[in-house]
Image: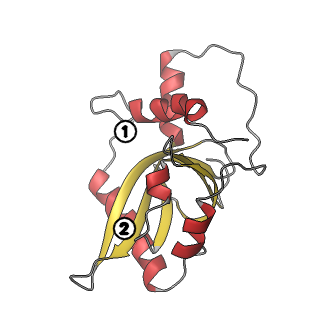
Amino acid sequence: CRLHGGMLLPALLASLLANLPGADVDHDADDSAIFARLEKATAELAEGGKSPLTAAQRLEQCKRAQTTKVAFRAPAKETLGGEETYRRAAAAAVLIGSAYKCDKCTKWHHTLALSCAVTADGVIATNHHVAANPSAEAMGVMTADGRFFPVREVLAADKPHDVALLRVDAKDL
């Protein structure tokens, strides 16, 4: 698939809209706790040198403009109601976190970005500027149910359209 911002925009918008404040949800989420768990997990990857993808490898992979490693399902022909659309979009929403060190202290710092799972087997859509962050030493994805997955590969990226596809080892996203 050739990566182009136009084909991912609907999925990304649905994910974003599913997380607007005041949206009707089945249960409350503790954002602070989720952010803290993601920050801890990415810092542990970076600190222990356990990231499966080095910063240099990730940046090199961000030069890939297309991939044959993703097979998207055909769109469903059924019309979904608002509640089911919301539930599917909310289930696809994930956070991407990265850990980096600044030149002023020895602490790990973090960036967080909203992204979405576009396949059940671990393909994540995000922005190019997230994937191509040169200071990020480790990067991982956390689902709403608290599962954490290190980023294993940048499948394709498109800087002009600011989109990228990442791979994590996951099932049932």
Please tell me how crowded label 1 is: few (under 14), some (14-19), or many (20+) other residues with Cα within 10 Å.
Answer: few
Kind of residue indicated by mark 2: Glu
Report the side of 70 relative to 106 (left or right): right
Which residue corresponds to the image point at 36% horizontal and 67% vertical from the top-left? 39
For the N terminus, which image quadrant? top right
Sequence-first disc among 1 and 2: 1
Marks counted in the figure total 2
Q: Quadrant of residue 133?
A: bottom left
Which residue corresponds to the image point at 48% horizontal and 44% vertical from the top-left? 162
Q: Give the distance between the C-alpha atoms of the residues marked 1 and 2, in whole angstroms.
A: 23 Å
Which mark, residue 39? 2
Instruction: Name the residue nearer the viewer: 167 or 76.
Output: 167
Q: Secondary structure at mark 2?
A: helix
x and y percent of residue 110 in the render? 33, 66
Which residue corresponds to the image point at 36% horizontal and 56% vertical from the top-left? 112
Report the side of 35 relative to 45 (left or right): left
| Residue corresponding to mark 1 | 27
Is residue 54 visible in the rendered image? The answer is: no
